[in-house]
Image (cartoon, helix red, strand yellow):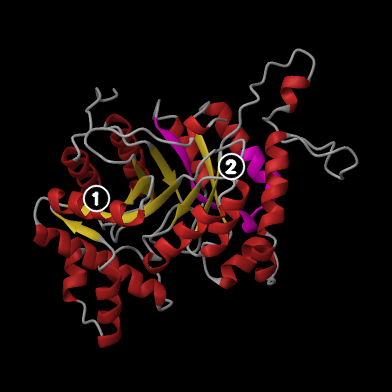
Amino acid sequence: MTADEIRGETAGTAQVPLSVLDLVTVGAGRTATDALRTSIELSRLAENRGFHRYWVAEHHSMPGVASTSPAVILAHLAAHTDRIRLGSGGVMLPNHAPLVIAEQFGTLEAMAPSRIDLGLGRAPGTDGATAAALRRTDRLNEGADDFPQQLAELTRFLDDDFPDGHPYARIHAVPGPIQATAPGGVQSPHRPPVWLLGSSGFSARLAGTLGLPFAFAHHFSAQNTIPALDLYRESFTPSEVLDAPYALIGVSALATDDEKEARRQVLAAALNMVRLRTGRPGLVPTPEEAEAYEFSPMEREFVDSWNSNVIHGTADEVRAGLDDLQKRTGADELMITGNAHSGDVRLRSYELIADAYQLPKAQTQA
């Protein structure tokens, strides 16, 4: 693992590397199979148009989001791509035993050598009851509070370097470095770089202290973006991984061929968020359903606030919004998530953004 695997390269006229965050959204009238097929198409598009990396996020008990199992989805995407970096944005570590994640991502690394990122978060990625079912405990704060210890344990498993006398010293994550030391072993010692994800200051400070790359969820915590990035940079200590801070931000952005259509699409995505936040999660509604929906004054206020942080419009408008956001935050990389009812709309959005930045066009895979 080197800093070159973390720091992306710019393409076209973009000021920083552009990447993709896929929530594998499921629209009304569509199936999870449809959503996952869109993910395959989108990962290919991202690879062919010069986006740097492609991440999927862990969510649970949300009908409109089919990304419950990042490792499974990433294995599928690895089989359909050749070059683009693939990763988790992220795995919610308190939901899992560190050894299990080390094994899963060791397997992914074996499938797609030097293409895998391991992004980690400490939130449950769901509501409290679902988190309790995942973790087999209702002591949810304990998992979040133990995150630094879980991270340290996971890193030890990835590097296979528990000290002598440690209870786990004779336990090895496979695939992993232990295979290189077995008789006849030729296993690569390489392992996926670890990223810390966050929407507040906790992971920002921890990532800085450990000298790790940091990814901030601007797309749902915009008010905390600059304070968290400042804290990360102020806390940063050079490490074997990085000699200087590297931060990406997740950005909600949707480009369409005309501004009116963009407004229709983001209204539908906002209605989906209204329902989620009020305990009524469902599939992403159609724009027609959103236009016919009678928003209460409180719901309308939420929609206006939510959509104020969604960069949307024509390709040129979205490019201008992304450039302005990067300038204001100093982000080293922009990871774009485009949420809409239709997979075709999402695909078109990334194509338009790629064109706006003059990203190169590679030969389409057969």
Q: Residues within 10 Å of mark 2 (few under 14, many from 20)?
A: some
* Relative horizontal placement of residue 305, taking residue 110 as reference (left or right): left
On the image, numbered disc 2 is attached to which residue? 238
Residue 92 at x, y = what percent?
A: 57, 55
* Relative horizontal placement of residue 313, taking residue 303 as reference (left or right): left
**Residue 268 higher or lower than 296, as above or below:** above
Image quadrant holding the C terminus, namely: top left
Count of numbered badges drawn on the protein: 2
**Residue 123 higher or lower than 239, as above or below:** below
| Residue shown at 21% from the left, 71% from the top | 290
The span picked out in magenta is 84-104
**Residue 197 higher or lower than 53, as above or below:** below
Picture quarter containing residue 216?
bottom left
Image quadrant holding the N terminus, namely: top right
Residue 84 at x, y = what percent?
A: 39, 31
Of callouts 2 and 1, the N-terminal one: 2
Disc 2 marks a residue whose amino acid type is Pro
Residue 159 at x, y = what percent?
A: 70, 35
Task: State the residue in front, 340 or 158.
Answer: 158
Alpha-carbon span between mark 2 and mark 1: 28 Å
Task: State the residue in front, 215 or 255.
Answer: 215
* Helix, strand or loop status at disc 2: loop
Which disc is residue 323 wearing?
Answer: 1
Residue 6 at x, y = what percent?
A: 48, 36
Tell whether label 1 touches label 2 (CB within 8 Å). no
| Residue shown at 24% from the left, 50% from the top | 323
* Relative horizontal placement of residue 24, taking residue 193 as reference (left or right): left
Disc 1 marks a residue whose amino acid type is Asp
